Image: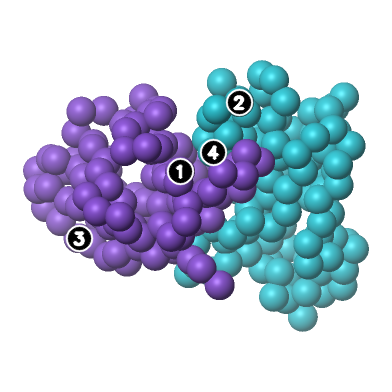
Amino acid sequence: EPEVTQTPSHQVTQMGQEVILRCVPISNHLYFYWYRQILGQKVEFLVSFYNNEISEKSEIFDDQFSVERPDGSNFTLKIRSTKLEDSAMYFCASTGQDDTGELFFGEGSRLTVL
Amino acid sequence: GNSVTQMEGPVTLSEEAFLTINCTYTATGYPSLFWYVQYPGEGLQLLLKATKADDKGSNKGFEATYRKETTSFHLEKGSVQVSDSAVYFCAPNAGGTSYGKLTFGQGTILTVHP
């Protein structure tokens, strides 16, 4: 069964460093998302991406964050200068043209900022 | 924006017990409603969904009915198993062109003992 894959599964970085989290969505999907879950808190929407541009973003998704689809398969989330509060589990998700909103999530990338 | 109030946990049950996890939401328009499950060490998986009022979503013995009049989407299972131990998230979507933007509840940890 097709699945969303994310790398790395866990990354430890120093505060102020740049981090890139990678995702390979399901191949025929067109809509891509990043969510995050700070330990013990809710899963929160960060950004949605369609047709090579951001379609919606949350307040969390400030200038330190960016997303890119550099080729036909990868979807990346970049954090330019990490802060301690960026430590979280980051989930990538994708969906096709079904407008019911059913998202297919990856297993997540855990980011630890020291 | 949408908001979700989900029954707080943790919930601890014996195998074969009846499960109810309450979820109420506020939303503009007519969202689709979802229950996602997160098994230990894994990502988020769709458990079931309902896309319009009075629809019943069901999967793996779990059920939830879209109650527009009470803005609720309570999750039930008649007889839980140890393998159902996981975190359960209720999530309406934003509807319209933001259908992939989910608002998650805080999650309910379910532990089922033999």
Q: How far apart, in angstroms, are the residues tagged by discs 3 and 1?
A: 28 Å
Q: Quadrant of the C terminus of chain B?
A: bottom right
Residue underneath mark 1: A31
Looking at the picture, which amino acid does disc 4 mark?
Gly
Of the numbered discs 3 and 1, the one sitting upstream in the chain is: 3
In the rendered structure, the residue with mark 1 lies on which chain? A
Counting from the top left corner in percent of width and height, residue B71 is at: 79, 28
- Circle 1 or circle 4, nearest the eye: 1
Query: Measuring 31% from the left and 38% from the top, which residue is drawn there?
Result: A52
Residue underneath mark 3: A12
Query: Measuring 47% from the left and 56% from the top, which residue is drawn there?
Result: A28
In the rendered structure, the residue with mark 2 lies on which chain? B
Q: How far apart, in angstroms, are the residues tagged by discs 1 and 2?
A: 14 Å
Give the letter of the purple chain.
Answer: A
Does residue A7 sit above or below B7 in this rendering?
below
- Sort mark 3 into few (<14), some (14-19) or many (20+) by Cα contacts within 10 Å: few
Counting from the top left corner in percent of width and height, residue B55 is at: 86, 42
Give the letter of the cyan chain.
Answer: B
Q: How far apart, in angstroms, are the residues tagged by discs 4 and 2?
A: 9 Å
Which residue reaches farthest bottom?
Answer: B114
Q: Quadrant of the N terminus of chain B?
A: top right
- Circle 3 or circle 4, nearest the eye: 4
- Circle 3 or circle 1, nearest the eye: 1
Residue underneath mark 4: B100
Question: Is label 3 on the same chain as label 1?
Answer: yes
Counting from the top left corner in percent of width and height, residue B23 is at: 74, 39
Tell me if A47 is positioned left or right of B18 in this view. left
